[in-house]
Amino acid sequence: MKTRAEIKVKGLVQGVGYRAFAKRVAERLGLNGFAQNMPDGSVKIIVEGEREAIEEFIGECRRGPPLSDVEDVNVKWEEYKGEFDNFYYF
């Protein structure tokens, strides 16, 4: 079943390739959405796709790329909207 999650990742997650990492993982899992640096130093991710794939994605978000230091991952499940055709970051 398709669903959507809003994910907020806190810790050392800016300037360490976190968004590009999220894009690679999302593409591998067939997920769409975006990752964006936030002014508070966190990364916000909106991701859509199969729930099982999103759960795997969240696990990867908790690990992060090698230079990151993830302190917290907050997930809010939402209704699937189908508004993305790829995974982007900015």
Image: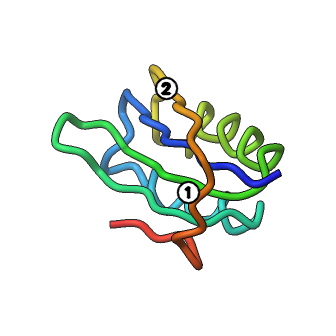
Of residue 1 and residue 66, the one placed in the foreground of this image is: 1
Q: Is residue 26 left or right of residue 53?
A: left
The quadrant of the image that shows the C terminus is: bottom left
Residue at which label 2 appears: 74
Q: Is residue 61 left or right of residue 45?
A: right
Mark 1 surroundings: few (<14), some (14-19) or many (≥20) residues within 10 A: some
User: Could you tell me which residue is drawn at 75 percent across and 54 percent down?
Assistant: 2
Of residue 39 and residue 2, the one placed in the foreground of this image is: 2
Query: What is the secondary structure assignment of the residue under circle 1?
Result: helix
Of residue 10 and residue 69, the one placed in the foreground of this image is: 10
Query: What is the secondary structure assignment of the residue under circle 2?
Result: strand
Residue 17 is situated, as x and y percent measured from the top left of the image, at 44, 55
Depicted 35 relative to depicted 63: above or below: below
The three-letter code of the residue at mark 2 reads Asn
> Which callout, 2 or 1, points to the residue nearer the camera?
2
The three-letter code of the residue at mark 1 reads Phe
Depicted 88 relative to depicted 34: above or below: below
Total numbered badges shown on the rendered structure: 2
In the picture, the disc for residue 72 is none
Residue at which label 1 appears: 21
User: Could you tell me which residue is drawn at 71 percent across and 46 percent down?
Assistant: 54
Depicted 4 relative to depicted 11: above or below: below
Q: Is residue 54 left or right of residue 44?
A: right
Mark 2 / mark 1, whichever is N-terminal: 1
User: Residue 61's image quarter?
Assistant: top right
* Real-space Cα separation, disc 2 to disc 1, in angstroms: 18 Å
Mark 2 surroundings: few (<14), some (14-19) or many (≥20) residues within 10 A: few
Residue 35 is situated, as x and y percent measured from the top left of the image, at 43, 56
Residue 45 is situated, as x and y percent measured from the top left of the image, at 46, 49
Q: Is residue 21 left or right of residue 29?
A: left
